[in-house]
Amino acid sequence: CSSDAWMGDAAAFGREFRGARILQALLTDLVRRGLGQGGRHTLLLSGQSAGARGAMVHLDYVHEMLAAAGLPDAAASVEVLGVLDSPLWVDISPYGASSEVLSSQCQSVYSFAQVKHLGGGGGGGGPPR
C-alpha cells in the first residue's frame, strides 16, 4: 500500500505519499522491458479497494505516463484497459456529529498528497469540489 490510494506525490506529516511516482516507475520499467515495442501490446491496470481508486484516477493518463517513460507513440502501440474492483464509496452523512464526511477527508488527502490526476485533463486539476 502506498498510503495515498496510489495517487499522491508528496511528503507530509513526516511520511511519504508517492503512489503516482510508484506507478510511473513501474510503467518506466515496463517500457524498458519492451512494452509497446515490436507490435501492439495490451496493458491491464487493475486494483482493489484503494488500489482501484488509484487505478481509476490514473487510467486516463497512462498514455501520457508511458510517453514520459520513453514511449512517445504509446497511444498507437499500447491499448490500456482497467479492471476496478470496489473503487467507490457511498458518500453519506456520518452517523456521529464528531465524524468527518468522507468526501472532505478525501479532499484533504488530495491536497496534502499533491494528487495531480483529478480532472482538468493534461495531468492538472485539483481536488474535486
Image (cartoon, rainbow, N blue to C red):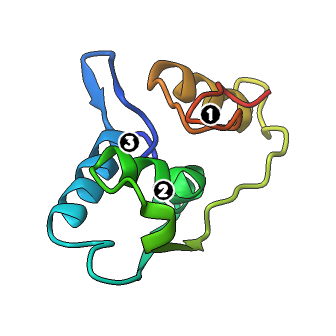
Evaluate whether residue 4 shows in this view.
Answer: yes
Circle 1 sits in a helix, a strand or a loop, which is it?
A: helix
Q: Earlier in the sequence, mark 1 or mark 3?
A: 3
Which is more foreground, mark 3 or mark 2? 2
Please rate how many residues cluster around mark 3, counting C-alpha atoms within 10 Å: few if below 14, some from 14 to 19, many from 20: many
Q: Is residue 52 above or below residue 128?
A: below
Read off the residue under disc 2.
Answer: 63
Q: Where does the image place residue 85, in percent across and percent down from the top left?
A: 57, 73
Splitting the image into 4 quarters, where does residue 81 fall?
bottom right
Judge from the rendering whether residue 92 lies leftward or rightward of residue 48; answer left or right: right
43 vs 20, nearest the viewer: 43
How many marks are shown on the rendered structure?
Answer: 3
Q: Amino acid at mark 3?
A: Ala
Q: Earlier in the sequence, mark 1 or mark 2?
A: 2
Q: Amino acid at mark 2?
A: His
Q: Amino acid at mark 1?
A: Cys
Q: Where does the image place residue 62, in percent across and percent down from the top left?
A: 47, 55
Residue most extreme to the right: 93
Circle 2 sits in a helix, a strand or a loop, which is it?
A: helix
Splitting the image into 4 quarters, where does residue 108 fall?
top right
Judge from the rendering whether residue 88 lies leftward or rightward of residue 79; answer left or right: right
Read off the residue under disc 1.
Answer: 106
> Residue at image x 70%, y 27%?
104
Please rate how many residues cluster around mark 1, counting C-alpha atoms within 10 Å: few if below 14, some from 14 to 19, many from 20: few
51 vs 30, nearest the viewer: 30
Circle 3 sits in a helix, a strand or a loop, which is it?
A: helix
Q: Where does the image place residue 50, in percent across and percent down from the top left?
A: 50, 55
Q: Residue 20, which numbered label? A: 3
